[in-house]
Image (cartoon, rainbow, N blue to C red):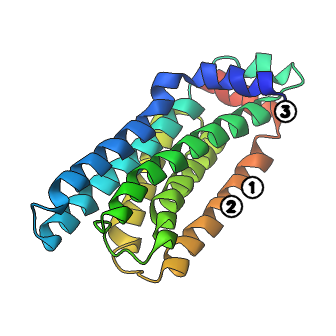
């Protein structure tokens, strides 16, 4: 994969879209810093608990938009850079930006002692791992369906799972992020295999 291919997909997805996770992460950090010394610990933790979920869903929306609605599937499949490579590259770009956004959000709040349930620098895995999981959900949904509605529903379902059913009850960090990251790896592998079928890739767009 050449540098020109990476830059081409970066431009194709759009810097404005890719800046969303970093921007939201920065805004959450600013909000957390502003309330750290004026609100009670419980109030600040509750606020940040909700705001960090806004970051996660922002990552999901970014991934969904980046991975769906490409009318150039046949063109991609007729070049050395296949549609599978394009999708994996786009997912990788979104994942990197999302991890950066998560760290932009986490680091200032950790230094201020305002990050909820902070256990040290390893707590940075919480936003970074959530971002990687959501991107993997979007990639798998886009690989098997490709429609914006299906990918969006899948992203929302993944977000609900993490925010309401998993993170509040699984508090051990290695388990809390280890299992979702393992699931993300499996979903990425499944997407890689599915996107290797050129005929299905083209047929999926034709049906859509």
- In the rendered image, residue 26, in percent from the top left (x then y), is placed at 35, 43
Mark 3 against mark 2, which lies toward the viewer? 3
Front residue of 134 and 107: 107
Front residue of 139 and 50: 50
Front residue of 38 and 130: 38
Figure quadrant of residue 71: top right
Q: Quadrant of the C terminus?
A: top right
Q: Is residue 70 visible?
A: no
Mark 3 vs 1, N-terminal side: 3
Q: CA distance from mark 3 to mark 1?
A: 18 Å
Tell me if mark 3 has few (under 14), some (14-19) or many (20+) residues whose alpha carbon lies within 10 angstroms of its own. Answer: few
Q: Secondary structure at mark 2?
A: helix
- In the rendered image, residue 8, in percent from the top left (x then y), is placed at 70, 20
User: In screen coordinates, is 121 left or right of 193?
Assistant: left
Picture disc at residue 185 = 2
Q: CA distance from mark 2 to mark 1?
A: 6 Å
Q: Which residue is mark 3?
A: 1
Q: Is residue 208 visible?
A: yes
- In the rendered image, residue 60, in percent from the top left (x then y), is placed at 46, 44
Tell me if mark 2 has few (under 14), some (14-19) or many (20+) residues whose alpha carbon lies within 10 angstroms of its own. Answer: some
Front residue of 181 and 29: 29
């Amino acid at each position: 994969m050449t540098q020109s291919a990476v830059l081409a997909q970066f431009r194709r997805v759009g810097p404005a879209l890719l800046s969303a996770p970093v921007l939201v992460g920065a805004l959450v950090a600013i909000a957390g810093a502003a309330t750290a010394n004026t609100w009670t610990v419980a109030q600040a933790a509750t606020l940040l608990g909700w705001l960090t979920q806004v970051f996660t869903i922002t990552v999901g929306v970014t991934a969904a938009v980046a991975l769906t609605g490409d009318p150039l599937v046949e063109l991609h499949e007729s070049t050395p850079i296949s549609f599978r490579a394009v999708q994996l590259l786009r997912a990788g770009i979104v994942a990197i930006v999302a991890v950066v956004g998560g760290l932009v959000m986490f680091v200032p709040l950790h230094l201020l002692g305002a990050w909820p349930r902070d256990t040290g620098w390893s707590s940075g895995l919480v936003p970074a791992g959530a971002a990687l999981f959501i991107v993997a959900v979007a990639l798998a949904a886009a690989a098997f369906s490709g429609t914006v509605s299906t990918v969006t529903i899948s992203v929302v379902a993944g977000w609900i799972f993490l925010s309401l059913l998993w993170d509040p009850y699984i508090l051990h960090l290695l388990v809390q992020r280890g299992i979702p990251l393992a699931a993300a790896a499996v979903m990425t592998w499944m997407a890689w295999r599915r996107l290797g079928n050129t005929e299905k890739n083209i047929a999926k767009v034709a049906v859509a």
